Image (cartoon, helix red, strand yellow):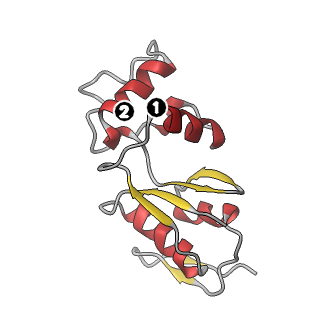
C-alpha cells in the first residue's frame, strides 16, 4: 500500500506520525510540504478526502494567520485555500494519505486508523507518551 505523509520535520507531531508509520514496517513517501507544497487541485483533494473544511485545515500557531486576517468568518473557502497556497505554513500537519483514506494526524496516533499494518509494539512519542500496540 502506498502511504504519503505531508511532513514538516520541525513539527513534533509530524515527526511522531512519521515514526509511527515506520514502526508498522512501512516506508512512506515523505513530502516536505513547505518546500514542495501541494497544487491547488491536490490541496482541495486532500481537504475533501480528509472530510475537512479549508478552515479546519488552517494552522494558526507560528503562522501569518492573524496578520492575514484569516479569522474573518466572511472569508470564502477559495480565499482560505489561496492563503494556504501562498503561505504553506498555514496548512496544518501532518496530512497522511493511504488507500484507506486521508487524515490530519493530530494527535499522531490517528494515522493508525488508515494504515494497513498494525502497530506491533508500544511506541513512545517524543514527549514520553506511550501509544499502545495494536493487533
Residue 40 badge: 1
Figure check: 85 above or below 22? above
Q: Residue at x 52, y 55 (%)?
A: 106
Earlier-in-chain disc, 1 versus 2: 1
Give the camera-side residue of 6 and 94. Answer: 6
All told, the count of numbered labels is 2
For label 2, the crowd category at 10 Å Cα-Cα, with few meaning under 14, some 14 to 19 and many 20 or more, is some
User: Element type at marker 1?
Assistant: helix
Q: For the residues carrying marks 1 and 2, which lies nearer the camera in this image?
A: 1
Q: Are marks 1 and 2 in contact (CB under 8 Å)?
A: yes
Q: Secondary structure at mark 2?
A: helix
**Who's the residue at 46% across and 75% down the image?**
125
Can I make out residue 60 in this image? no
The residue that appears at 76% across and 81% down in the rendered structure is: 135
Q: Quadrant of residue 15?
A: bottom left
Side of 37 relative to 98 (left or right): left
Q: CA distance from mark 1 to mark 2?
A: 7 Å
Please give the residue where the numbered disc 2 appears in the rendered image.
85
Amino acid at each position: 500500500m502506498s502511504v504519503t505523509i505531508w511532513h514538516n520535520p520541525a513539527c513534533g507531531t509530524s515527526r511522531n506520525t512519521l515514526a509511527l508509520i515506520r514502526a508498522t514496517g512501512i516506508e512512506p513517501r515523505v513530502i516536505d510540504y513547505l518546500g514542495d507544497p501541494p497544487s491547488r487541485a491536490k490541496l482541495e483533494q486532500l481537504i475533501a478526502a480528509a472530510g475537512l473544511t479549508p478552515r479546519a485545515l488552517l494552522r494558526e500557531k507560528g503562522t501569518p494567520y492573524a496578520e492575514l486576517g484569516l479569522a474573518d468568518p466572511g472569508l470564502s473557502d477559495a480565499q482560505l485555500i489561496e492563503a494556504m497556497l501562498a503561505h504553506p505554513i498555514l496548512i496544518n500537519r501532518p496530512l497522511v494519505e493511504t488507500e484507506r483514506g486521508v487524515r490530519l494526524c493530530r494527535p499522531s496516533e490517528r494515522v493508525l486508523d488508515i494504515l494497513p499494518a498494525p502497530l506491533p509494539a508500544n511506541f513512545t512519542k517524543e514527549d514520553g507518551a506511550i501509544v499502545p500496540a495494536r493487533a
